[in-house]
Image (cartoon, rainbow, N blue to C red):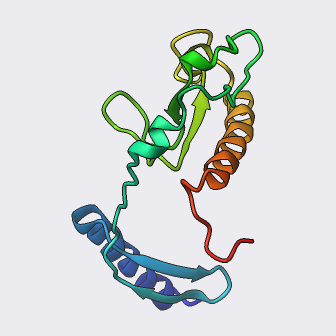
């Protein structure tokens, strides 16, 4: 790759980075051999899925996490625990990225009790997410177009 082409790409990267920081919108497709294939700007829309029906569906369900040493296996304590990247007391991810969790497992994944290592926690969450989403699909609370 020529220095002129590399310089042009660096200017474009700077332009895209500035646009992302000011507007939160950009798209860039890069091929390591050929450089930038295409770029465009588009509005990034953050869709927040909130569903009282999904949240209420956790009541009385078995814990989907089942973390040994933490799970109390008590369906009366089960809630919908958010497990996506935007989690915390004031910032919740979508209700579609949540699992059925008893109070003990919820405390464990939120770090309120013994902290699990990231890999172990991710395995429990992934398994629980699959179990919870299957339940929500079967209950008709999540609809997958074209499924039979």
Q: Is residue 95 above or below residue 10?
A: above
- Residue nearest the observer in this picture, 47 or 2: 47
Picture residue at 38% right of the left edge, 81% below the top: 12
Q: Is residue 10 visible?
A: no
**In terms of image quadrants, where is residue 23?**
bottom left
Q: How many marks?
A: 0
Picture residue at 68% right of the left edge, 26% below the top: 62
- Residue nearest the observer in this picture, 138 or 83: 138
Q: Quadrant of the N terminus?
A: bottom right
- Residue nearest the observer in this picture, 131 or 39: 131
**In terms of image quadrants, where is residue 70?**
top right
Q: Is residue 72 visible?
A: yes
**x%, y% of residue 77?**
55, 16
Picture residue at 67% right of the left edge, 11% below the top: 72
**x%, y% of residue 64?**
69, 31
Q: Quadrant of the C terminus?
A: bottom right
Q: Is residue 137 above or below residue 68?
A: below
**x%, y% of residue 14?**
34, 72
**x%, y% of residue 118?**
66, 30
Q: Is residue 39 above or below residue 129?
A: below
Drawn side of residue 93 relative to residue 137, left or right:
left
Picture residue at 60% right of the left edge, 32% below the top: 100
């Amino acid at each position: 790759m020529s220095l002129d082409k590399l310089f042009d790409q660096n200017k474009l990267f700077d332009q895209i980075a500035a646009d992302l920081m000011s507007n939160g919108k950009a798209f860039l497709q890069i091929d390591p051999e050929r450089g930038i294939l295409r770029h465009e700007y588009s509005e990034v829309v953050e869709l927040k899925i909130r569903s009282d029906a999904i949240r209420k569906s956790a009541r009385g369900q078995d814990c989907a996490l089942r973390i040994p040493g933490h799970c109390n296996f008590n369906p009366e304590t089960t809630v919908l625990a958010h497990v996506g990247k935007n989690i915390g007391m004031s910032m919740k991810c979508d209700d579609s990225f949540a699992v059925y969790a008893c109070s003990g497992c919820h405390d464990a994944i939120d770090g309120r009790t013994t902290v699990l290592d990231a890999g172990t926690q991710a395995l429990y969450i992934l398994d629980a997410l699959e179990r919870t989403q299957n339940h929500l699909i079967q209950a008709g609370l999540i609809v997958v177009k074209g499924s039979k």
